[in-house]
Image: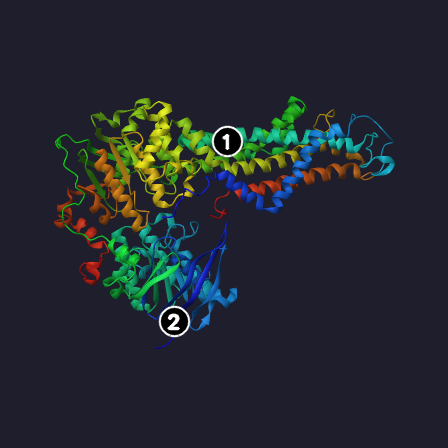
């Protein structure tokens, strides 16, 4: 066997923390052969991204390689000076990051940014670099490429930005492409396209790929080999198919179990139908939401985010609104909660005409509908203690006397699986999953009749995601809650919902109960959406890989 | 999941303090600043006497005849002037910074929170103040309304607030879009509460830094005005000492240099503290 293109030997990475040096990667050995796709799987904090950054020589300043070697074509990169590292980085090894918005420079057009890479590394002239940039953008299938090359990053969609990142990463024909969760921020259908593109480009350019992900479904569809990392250590590696078929380590088994199986079986939630099914809790009719878009010379145009949609949510049930980003699903939900202003339509929540409310009446009515937000990091005020975050709605909307609020908060903490002692902690002292629990406690505090879960589990690791979904379902059963569940993730939606509305470009294109949507989708768009979900079954035709 | 209950509840400010403590330059600046504040408060007790008394021959060089920093053109003890001036200069600096921050936060917060025409009007207003020649404008105010320290302080505040307003507005624009603000709104918090209790505390770090630096620049500004003679001659600020000895700058340079060095050290100390605050309060630099 020839020596591998890249081999990482006994790598140990340490980060400086208050308690001294903390290892985040320990005794890690991986190798990568030319032309293959290696997937590194693990949850956040498992050290997979740190490994990638170490290979790129881009560790944050508080981190350093304490031990081990990183051999690229036989040369130890840990011993190289900056100049030789720069020659490799971006040129022979390039990287695609998770967040395509922040990894592009917002003040340059995308074409200029790619051309700059070419000028720096390949010494091309301005003109040549630009025409090569156009070719690359065309290769990653940016439509109307001559015009779009002159667009700024914010003028592109998330998927297009990630395509630009890929084009930039491939600009110098690297031997290794490291993709760090390249599709986490993207919709499933876009994710499927990006993966397709990456497969194709890898074939064409014969670049080896290291794909970092948390999703075993993605591994099944993309990888030749897989390395599973847990808490900084490699717990399992091997051929992707073998690992998926016969996972040895319990953590790998958990990961595989958490991949959605898009089945049509009845929901295991055991929620009984509400007796008054004919009287919906929430009824939305012809809801339209428009935003002004500022054009040049002060002319204002309206962008229609939600285009006259109608739906009902039955009491004690969960309606999922599924769609890709930009489909208007979040806007519609926030309009129901009066957190975004609707232009026309009717929203009746428990007999109250929500859109007709103004001022103090509106403020009081907010107690009836609460929201659990997507981002566990920005949805909690960093200056408030966890207990005070939950207290906020109680103070403003609650009917409880002040003396009983403390007990109520403790009770809510208990209900969402947190210890009441944790009331005194600040948000940053909690993990992502725990933060989402705080968010849930806050939403429950006013005894709302409707809870909007806006991508409430999308930002969480798969294992944590499952825990939070369980919690939401337990709460629904215990408290007879009604959820309006906004998600792009059909796997998640399948687990929790009773009915599904599929949104596309501001319209509801399909509405039905879960079973119908998953087994007999009538619309092409819904079928695309379903087909784009990475599943183990479809990729390898492995039946019941999970234990 | 690790057990989080064992962790002490540390407020973001406690963490910021920890970060500040590790910044040696900032701590040194703070120590110097505290010394100067100490002198301003207790100096007149330790070194009594009216600074305006003519105590010895004019232009006695520093160290001679028991006058540590010499005497000025009227034979006044420069050390005594300096000690009494510390309180005046620091007060002017703090008061001007307070005026600046008050106007700046009000304008910036309203513009950033309400957007729309409120923002348009307020930001055009801010720009109007920003394009005024600051020194000239403050001279006009002082000339029109009298050269009292209060008027000088107000004048400095009036020409300096646009920077704070812009920072505040930018922070408000950023923070108002965050989910916890929407969550607070869903939780029934009124607009006033959103502005002052939810957004403002989160917007404070860069404003605090700007305010700290503002104290330093206000001291400089006051010195500048005093140098031009726009000051109350009966109050011994550091700038006033420089201003009154201006004509003798070539013959007895120490009369100007000594208060100049005092201003330099103070402003430097404030800048170091401001920088330290910036690092400590900027969450991007704070390690987790």
Image quarter in which the C terminus of chain A is found: bottom left
Marks 2 and 1, how far apart in space? 57 Å
**Residue A400, labelled with which disc?**
none
Image coordinates for residue A475, horizontal then vertical, percent: 25, 37
Image coordinates for residue A306, horizontal then vertical, percent: 25, 38
Q: Is residue B274 visible?
A: yes
Q: Please tell me which residue lies in front, A480 or B277.
A: A480
Residue B5 to residue B38: above or below: below
Q: Specify whether disc 2 shares its chain with disc 1.
A: no
Q: Is residue B249 visible?
A: no
Q: Residue at 18% of width from left, 58% of height from top?
A: A544
Q: Residues within 10 Å of mark 2 (few under 14, many from 20)?
A: some
The quarter of the picture where residue A506 lies is: top left
Q: Residue at 39% of width from left, 37% of height from top?
A: A421
Q: Residue at 21% of width from left, 63% of height from top?
A: A540
Q: Please tell me which residue lies in front, A174 or B205.
A: B205
Q: Residue at 61% of width from left, 41% of height from top?
A: B271
The quarter of the picture where residue A225 lies is: bottom left
**What residue did someone put label 1 on?**
B105
The quarter of the picture where residue A331 lies is: top left
User: In the structure shown, which secondary structural element does the residue marked by tag 1 occupy?
Assistant: helix
Image quarter in which the N terminus of chain A is found: bottom left
Image coordinates for residue A77, horizontal then vertical, percent: 47, 67
**What residue did someone put label 2 on?**
A5
Q: Residues within 10 Å of mark 1 (few under 14, many from 20)?
A: many
| Chain for disc number 1 | B
| Chain for disc number 2 | A
Residue A70 lies left or right of residue A466; in this view the side is right
Describe the colour scheme in one phrase: rainbow
Image coordinates for residue A147, horizontal then vertical, percent: 34, 53
């Amino acid at each position: 066997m020839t020596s591998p293109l890249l081999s990482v030997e006994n790598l140990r990475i340490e980060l400086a923390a208050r308690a001294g040096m903390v290892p985040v990667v320990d005794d890690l050995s991986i190798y990568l052969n030319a032309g293959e796709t290696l997937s590194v799987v693990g949850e956040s904090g498992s050290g997979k991204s740190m490994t990638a950054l170490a290979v790129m020589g881009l560790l944050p300043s508080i981190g350093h390689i304490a031990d081990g070697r990183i051999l690229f074509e036989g040369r130890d990169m840990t011993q190289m000076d900056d100049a030789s590292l720069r020659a490799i980085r971006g040129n022979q090894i390039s990287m695609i990051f998770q967040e395509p918005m922040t990894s592009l420079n917002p003040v340059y057009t995308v074409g200029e940014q790619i051309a700059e890479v070419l000028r720096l590394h390949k010494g091309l002239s301005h003109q040549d670099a630009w025409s090569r940039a156009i070719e690359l953008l065309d290769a990653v299938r940016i439509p109307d490429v001559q015009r779009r090359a002159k667009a700024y990053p914010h003028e592109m969609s998330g998927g297009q930005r990630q395509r630009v990142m890929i084009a930039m990463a491939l600009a110098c024909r690297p031997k290794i492409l490291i993709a760090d969760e390249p599709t986490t921020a993207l919709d499933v259908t876009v994710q499927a396209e990006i993966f397709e593109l990456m497969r194709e480009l890898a074939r064409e350019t014969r670049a080896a790929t290291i794909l970092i992900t948390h999703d075993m479904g993605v591994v099944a569809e993309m990888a030749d080999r897989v390395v599973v990392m847990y808490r900084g250590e490699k717990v399992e590696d091997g051929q992707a198919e073998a690992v998926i078929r016969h996972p040895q380590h319990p953590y790998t088994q958990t990961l595989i179990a958490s991949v959605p199986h898009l089945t049509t079986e009845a929901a295991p939630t055991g929620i009984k139908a509400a007796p008054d099914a004919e009287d919906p809790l929430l009824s939305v009719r012809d809801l339209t939401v428009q935003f002004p878009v500022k054009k040049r010379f002060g002319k204002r145009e309206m962008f229609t985010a939600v285009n006259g949609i109608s739906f009902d949510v039955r009491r004690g049930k969960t309606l999922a609104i599924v769609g890709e980003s930009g489909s208007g699903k979040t806007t519609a939900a926030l309009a129901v909660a009066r957190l975004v202003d609707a232009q026309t339509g009717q929203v009746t929540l428990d007999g109250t005409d929500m859109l007709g409310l103004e001022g103090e009446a509106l403020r009081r009515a907010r107690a009836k509908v609460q929201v659990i937000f997507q981002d566990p990091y920005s949805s909690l005020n960093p200056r408030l203690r966890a207990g005070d975050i939950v207290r906020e709605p109680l103070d403003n909307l609650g009917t409880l006397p002040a003396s009983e609020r403390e007990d109520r908060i403790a009770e809510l903490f208990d209900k969402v699986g947190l210890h009441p002692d944790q009331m005194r902690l600040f948000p940053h002292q909690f993990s992502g999953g725990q933060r989402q629990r705080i968010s849930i406690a806050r939403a429950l505090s006013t005894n709302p009749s409707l809870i909007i879960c806006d991508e409430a589990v999308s930002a969480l690791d798969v294992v944590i995601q499952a825990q939070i979904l369980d919690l939401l379902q337990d709460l629904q059963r215990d408290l007879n809650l009604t959820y309006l569940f906004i998600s792009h993730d059909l796997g998640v939606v399948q687990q929790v919902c009773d009915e599904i509305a599929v949104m596309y470009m501001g319209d509801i294109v399909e509405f039905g109960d879960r079973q119908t949507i998953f087994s007999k989708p009538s619309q092409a768009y819904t079928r695309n959406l379903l087909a784009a979900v990475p599943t183990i079954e479809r990729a390898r035709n492995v039946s019941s890989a999970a234990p | 999941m690790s057990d989080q209950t064992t962790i002490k509840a540390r407020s973001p400010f406690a963490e910021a303090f920890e970060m500040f403590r590790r910044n040696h330059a900032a701590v040194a600046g703070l120590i110097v600043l505290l010394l100067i504040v100490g002198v301003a408060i207790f100096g007149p007790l330790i070194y009594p006497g009216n600074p305006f008394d003519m105590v010895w021959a004019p232009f006695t060089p520093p160290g001679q005849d028991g006058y540590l920093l010499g005497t000025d053109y009227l034979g006044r003890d420069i050390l005594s002037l300096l000690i009494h001036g510390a309180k005046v200069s620091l007060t002017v600096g703090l008061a001007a910074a307070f005026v600046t921050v008050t106007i700046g936060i009000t304008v910036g917060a309203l513009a950033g929170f309400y957007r729309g025409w409120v923002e348009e009007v307020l930001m055009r207003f801010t720009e109007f103040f920003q394009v005024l020649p600051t020194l000239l404008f403050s001279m006009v105010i002082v000339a029109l309304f009298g050269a009292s320290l209060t008027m000088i302080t107000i004048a400095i505040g009036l020409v300096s607030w646009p920077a704070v307003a812009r920072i505040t507005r930018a922070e408000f624009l950023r923070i108002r879009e965050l989910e916890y603000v929407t969550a607070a709104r869903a939780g029934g918090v009124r607009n006033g509460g959103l502005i002052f209790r939810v957004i403002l505390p989160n917007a404070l770090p860069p404003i605090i830094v700007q305010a700290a630096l503002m104290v330093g620049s206000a001291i400089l500004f006051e010195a500048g005005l005093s140098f031009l003679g726009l000051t109350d001659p009966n109050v011994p600020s550091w700038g006033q000492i420089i201003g009154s000895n201006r004509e003798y700058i070539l013959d007895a340079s120490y009369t100007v240099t000594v208060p100049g060095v005092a201003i330099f050290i103070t402003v430097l100390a404030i800048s170091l503290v401001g920088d330290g605050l910036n690092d400590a309060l900027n969450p991007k630099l704070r390690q987790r």
